[in-house]
Image (cartoon, helix red, strand yellow):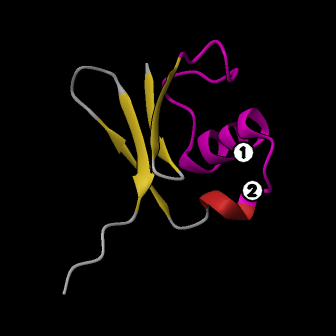
Amino acid sequence: MVHVRFEGRSYDVTERQIHISRDASDRTIKSRLAQHFDVTENRFETYVVDRRPSGDIIVRPEAVYG
């Protein structure tokens, strides 16, 4: 499962929906998500791809503190 936080909303998509494997590169994941959301790839440029021990993938905006 790929959990995505995009434009203030949370989405769950399967690897199959965005045509990736669990070992896909961060760049590939971001590219496929851009296609899925019908936006340009640069919209995901600063996003973080976090791979959890469970096998889930979390894609979220980079956290800014301070």
Q: Specify which label sits upstream in the sequence, 2 or 1.
A: 1
Report the residue marked by disc 1.
34
Residue at 80% x, 56% y is 40
How far apart in space, not on screen, are marks 2 and 1 (Cα)?
5 Å
Say what amino acid the circle numbered 2 marks: Glu
Disc 2 residue crowd, few under 14, some 14–19, many 20+, Cα 10 Å? some
Residue at 57% x, 21% y is 21
Q: Of residues 21 and 49, which is closer to you in this image?
A: 49
Whole-percent x, y for residue 39 in the image: 78, 50
Q: Is residue 44 magenta?
A: no
Please tell me whether mark 2 sits on a helix, a strand or a loop. helix
Residue at 72% x, 38% y is 37
Tell me: residue 25, above or below residue 48.
Answer: above
Disc 1 residue crowd, few under 14, some 14–19, many 20+, Cα 10 Å? some
Quadrant of the drawing holding the C terminus: bottom left
Whole-percent x, y for residue 41 in the image: 75, 56
Give the extent of the magenta segment. Answer: 14-41
